[in-house]
């Protein structure tokens, strides 16, 4: 079997998957998105990279694991997605599939599709106008989370409770051409903000963690959040499974949250989840689980 990892060659996540693949005698090569190219000639398409002497033609791999979608211009991001679609059309199994990555990297599209599938999501408003966002800010009791439409690990997320701060921030985001993505703030606990991360693989939970922070509304472990082992309920597993079905994701980190009244909501679906804090809290060897699953395909 031949496995391609698209991601940062220096990333520990890529290194860990590569090591697990080697243990199972699976050839595994790593290449970043910015080194990919496509050559259309005659009736064929060859997807290649700068380091062709180290790699097979990319469309000859059996499976491709996408480990990140780095920032870039609109043209660069669209071209990267085009390449994933081309790999898939050449018979390469892409995990996660291009249609799933396109959905999961877009917070609005993710929640929109999940809501249409009947899943509970936080009250959310998305627009390009600061004036519209300010009106909704009042309707949401002047306590909202403003998130970049694309982003991960809590970067760029702010909680806004002050009208003057809202006016300044919304106008600033409008001026730089950003989309204003607002969510009504849900507090799970007055003392400690917390949420859940369920790591899903092929429709089944690998495990779950509870992320808690007493100093920040963001529970991300890459910031100040602390992770602990969590045993997910049937309702939590079902919501995570339905979120994966709605987005088309196969390997995903699904984030859930309870409000103060005990109602469960879907927050996000991460199509390129990390597992450092998850492994520390659960003891689960995620790269080994992923490679075993790939090998059984």
Image (tube, grey):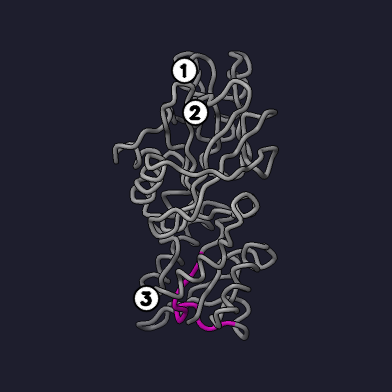
Q: Circle 3 is placed at which residue position?
A: 91
Q: Which residues are magenta?
A: 55-65
**Residue 55: image x %, image y %?**
57, 82
Q: Which mark is residue 120?
A: none
Say whether disc 3 or disc 1 marks the residue closer to the N-terminus: 3
Q: Which mark is residue 182?
A: 2
Tag 1–tag 2 contact (CB < 8 Å) = yes
38 up-or-down from 280: above or below: below
Q: Which mark is residue 140?
A: 1
Q: CA distance from mark 1 to mark 2?
A: 9 Å
Residues 293 and 76: in front is: 293
Q: Residue at x 58, y 13 (%)?
A: 163
Residues 196 and 122: in front is: 196
Q: Secondary structure at mark 1?
A: loop
Q: Residue at x 62, y 29 (%)?
A: 217
Say whether disc 1 or disc 2 marks the residue closer to the N-terminus: 1
**Outermost residue to the left:** 117
Dot 1 crowding, Cα within 10 Å, few <14, some 14–19, many 20+:
some
């Amino acid at each position: 079997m031949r496995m391609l990892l698209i991601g940062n060659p220096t990333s520990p996540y890529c290194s860990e998957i590569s090591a697990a693949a080697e243990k199972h005698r699976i050839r595994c090569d790593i290449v970043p998105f910015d080194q990919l190219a496509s050559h259309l000639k005659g009736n064929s398409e060859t997807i290649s990279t700068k380091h062709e002497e180290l790699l097979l033609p990319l469309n000859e791999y059996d499976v491709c694991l996408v480990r990140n979608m780095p920032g870039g211009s609109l043209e660069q991001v669209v071209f990267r997605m085009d390449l994933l679609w081309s790999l898939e059309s050449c018979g390469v199994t892409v995990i996660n599939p291009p249609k799933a990555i396109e959905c999961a990297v877009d917070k609005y599209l993710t929640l929109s599709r999940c809501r249409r599938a009947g899943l509970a999501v936080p009250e959310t408003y998305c627009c390009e106008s600061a004036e519209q966002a300010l009106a909704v800010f009042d309707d949401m009791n002047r306590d909202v989370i403003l998130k970049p439409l694309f982003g991960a690990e809590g970067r760029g997320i702010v909680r806004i409770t002050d009208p003057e701060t809202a006016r300044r921030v919304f106008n600033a985001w409008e001026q730089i051409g950003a989309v204003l993505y607002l969510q009504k703030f849900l507090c799970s606990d007055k003392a400690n903000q917390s949420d859940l991360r369920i790591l899903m693989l092929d429709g089944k939970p690998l495990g779950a963690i509870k992320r808690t922070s007493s100093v920040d509304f963001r529970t991300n472990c890459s910031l100040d959040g602390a992770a602990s082992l969590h045993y997910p309920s049937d309702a939590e597993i079902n919501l995570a499974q339905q979120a994966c079905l709605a987005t088309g994701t196969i390997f995903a980190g699904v984030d859930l949250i309870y409000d103060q009244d005990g109602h469960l909501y879907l927050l996000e679906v991460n199509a390129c989840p990390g597992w450092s804090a998850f492994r520390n809290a659960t003891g689960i060897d995620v790269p080994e689980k992923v490679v075993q699953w790939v090998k059984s395909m």
